[in-house]
Amino acid sequence: MSLPHALLTSLLEQPCSGLELARRFDRSIGFFWHATHQQIYRELGRLEGAAWVESLPPETGRGRKKVYRVLPAGRKELKRWTAEPQDPKPLREELMLKLRAEAVVGPTALKEDIERRLAIHRQKLSLYRELEAHDFPAPIESREAQLQHLVLTAGIMFESSWIEWSEKALQVLTQPQKNQERP
């Protein structure tokens, strides 16, 4: 996924100012596609330059912000990009290399790092479950809400999987090491 497409999606959901977009991004799309506020503002300028979005003139008065909305060309680009097939990305996780390294060099502080990560995954899972209870009370009827819930469900499954994996890894890492010499 690319940041321009994430921003187009968010602006189609609700036109807003750059600051509002950055805040909304942090509370939704930002859970699975991280971007700094600076990147968001920079990308809004590019999207405007490509005529995919426009900024409406600020309302009169002090402190009024420009509101961005998606133009037909931006909607067309988002439809094109959405229809484009994409292969799953291969796992590229440094932690897996660290486990392999610990297997050959012996115990390290990896157990503590996995415990720290486990706490982070538990916090995220708790947050996702709170969002699910608040934002998606049963039954979820609209197609749009069902699709948005699928994204959250993927996050819940991802965090649950990492929790389960981390607990297994900690079981292995806490086993006493047997003396085995490597050639």
Image: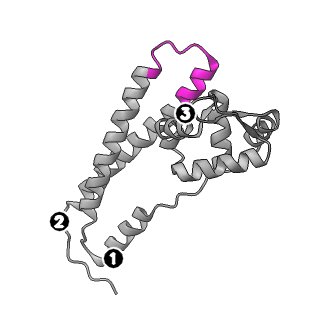
User: Picture coordinates of residue 68 (x, y %)?
Assistant: 67, 35
Q: Residue at x 34, y 87 (%)?
A: 183
Q: Is residue 131 above or below residue 35?
A: above
Q: Residue at x 26, y 58 (%)?
A: 172
Percent x, y of residue 26? 48, 40
Residue 138 in magenta? Answer: yes
Toward the viewer: 151 or 69? 69
Left or right: where does residue 171 sit relative to residue 25?
Answer: left
Q: Is residue 71 above or below residue 113?
A: above
First to last magenta residue range: 135-150
Residue to which mark 1 is pinned: 104
- Tell me, yes or no, whether the two marked residues, 2 and 1, touch with CB atoms within 8 Å: no
Q: Which residue is mark 3?
A: 62
- Rounded to the nearest whole Å, what is the CA distance between mark 2 and mark 3? 66 Å
- The residues bearing labels 3 and 1 have C-alpha atoms spaced at a distance of 63 Å
Res 1 seen here: no
- The reply to whether the magenta stretch includes residue 54 is no
Q: Amino acid at mark 2?
A: Pro
**Corner quadrant of residue 21:** top right
- Would you call the spot at circle 3 few (<14 residues within 10 Å), some (14-19), or many (20 or more)? few
- Helix, strand or loop at mark 3: loop
Residue 109, relative to residue 12: is it above or below?
Answer: below
Task: Please identify the residue farthest to the left as the structure is shown.
Answer: 176
Give the residue at mark 2: 176
